[in-house]
Image (cartoon, rainbow, N blue to C red):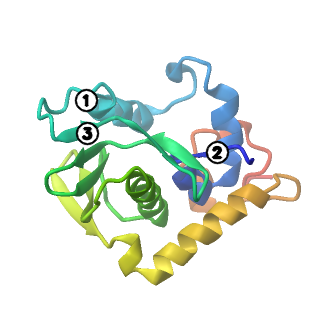
Amino acid sequence: MEEPIAITLLNDFVFCPASIYFHNMYQELDGMVFKDVPQIAGAHAHSSMDNNTYTSRKDVLQGIAVYSEKYGLIGKIDKFDTASGRLTESKKQIKQIFDGYVFQVYAQCFALQEMGYNVKKIVLHSIDDNKNYPIDLPQKNDLMRSKFEALIEEIRNFSLLGFGQTNQAKCESCIYSYACKWGCND
């Protein structure tokens, strides 16, 4: 049996596969050592979901662990309203919907469905401006579902040997760029 992939790594991998190496290396350290202001602010904004304090409604699951056996993915959801079937993933600020965001909620959706929940809609929520962005269910978007499945396969077969990031913008916004030998600056 293959080791499960953390759902959060889907977005990280899309951003840059090398960032996962550094994330794993630094995970035991205090976040203040390597995180920049946006990561710290995001963690703070997200804390009510992580700590189960966003709502006291009993029909809203928050911060629960989920697992998809089919895809070998493990992680936590932000919020799932069992009454409406609405799955919500919150980000501190959404300026653009990235594929990695969609892949994270697809993973959560599939895991919830395997657990017997009826996910009827998916929403990305931007905390700073309180905007919601509806996302197609994976069953209604064959292209994104195929890309999701291809990404999981790519992660399972990935090796840092021979990898080199070619997107300068990603390197410029990476909190690990100072230590990265796979980045654009080499």
Considering depth in this image, is 63 or 186 the residue closer to the camera? 63
Q: Nearer the viewer, mark 2 or mark 1?
A: 2
Could you tell whether 58 is left or right of 30 in the image? left
Residue 77 % position (x, y): 37, 43
Q: Earlier in the sequence, mark 2 or mark 1?
A: 2
Taking the spot 62% from the left edge, 53% from the top edge, the residue there is 171
Identify residue for label 2.
Answer: 4
Disc 3 on helix, strand or loop?
strand
**Which label was assigned to residue 90?**
none
- Give how far apart the Cα atoms at labels 1 and 3 are: 12 Å
**Above or below, comparing residue 170 to residue 179 in the picture:** below
Considering depth in this image, is 142 or 25 the residue closer to the camera? 142
| Viewer can see residue 5 | yes
Farthest residue toward the left? Answer: 57
**Which label was assigned to residue 61?**
3
Taking the spot 71% from the left edge, 40% from the top edge, the residue there is 21
**Above or below, comparing residue 150 to residue 33 in the picture:** below
Residue 34 % position (x, y): 57, 27
Residue type marked 3: Leu
**Which label was assigned to residue 48?**
1
**Above or below, comparing residue 121 to residue 60 in the picture:** below
